Image: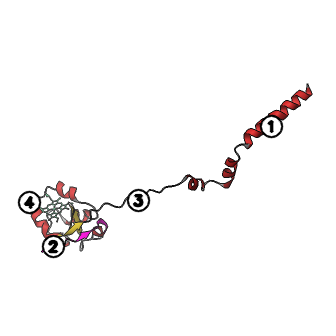
Amino acid sequence: MPTLTKIYTMEEASEHNTKDDCWVVIDGKVYDVSSYLDEHPGGDDVLLRATGKDATDEFEDAGHSKTARELMEQYCIGELDQTPPPIPELEIVSKKQDLKGLPQKVLNFSKQYWVVPVTVVGLSVVVGFLYLRKK
Ligand code: HEM
């Protein structure tokens, strides 16, 4: 009969981070080492510091023996949820929405872009006319 493996998220596993309730995550597996803390030859402090994250590197760095690896199976309570987090939907911001943030005055001005050149040409005509009349 197949055995059901309990799946935990890293968030769930990291909630167990005290001397009385200590879980560690090593190589995708979750271990409840609460009862092993006092016996651990490497000390309880290293295990407590290894909670709330993937402690695979720390475990491997300590150079654990084959015996240690066999022993740890006793404490395995499940596996880590490895499903990748969903990719957030890209927020498509249309140009129209983008313009919503601009002040109304700027928007109104951009609609009347022709006002500036027309004013310049108009003034030039008036100045030119006055200049010619003076002559
Ligand atoms: C279920 C998990 C674990 C078990 C069963 C376990 C078991 C053991 C055992 C039996 C030893 C004695 C040396 C050996 O036989 O290799 C040991 C040493 C040690 N362990 Fe662990 N360990 C576990 C997790 C960890 C973790 C997560 C870390 C690091 C964050 C760690 C760090 C150490 C250190 C630093 C030593 C001392 C090595 C030395 O003095 O040479 N252990 N462990």
The disc, 4 or 3, on the residue closer to the chain's N-terminal end is: 4
Q: Secondary structure at mark 1?
A: helix
The residue that appears at 18% across and 73% down in the rendered structure is: 4
Q: Secondary structure at mark 4?
A: helix
Query: What residue is pinned by disc 4?
Result: 66
Disc ID at residue 88 = 3
The residue that appears at 29% across and 62% down in the rendered structure is: 83
The amino acid at mark 2 is: Thr
Mark 3 surroundings: few (<14), some (14-19) or many (≥20) residues within 10 A: few
- Give the overall secondary structure of the magenta segment: loop
Residue 94, quarter of the rendered image: bottom right
- Residue range corresponding to the magenta coloring: 1-11
Residues at circles 4 and 3 in contact by the CB criterion of under 8 Å: no
Q: CA distance from mark 1 to mark 3?
A: 54 Å
- In percent of width and height, residue 31 lies at 20, 68
- In percent of width and height, residue 34 lies at 20, 72
The amino acid at mark 3 is: Pro
Q: Is residue 125 above or below residue 12?
A: above
Q: Is residue 124 something one can see in this rendering?
A: yes
24 or 95: nearer the viewer: 95
Q: Secondary structure at mark 2?
A: loop
Q: CA distance from mark 4 to mark 2?
A: 25 Å
Residues at circles 1 and 3 in contact by the CB criterion of under 8 Å: no
Query: What residue is pinned by disc 2?
Result: 3
The disc, 4 or 1, on the residue closer to the chain's N-terminal end is: 4
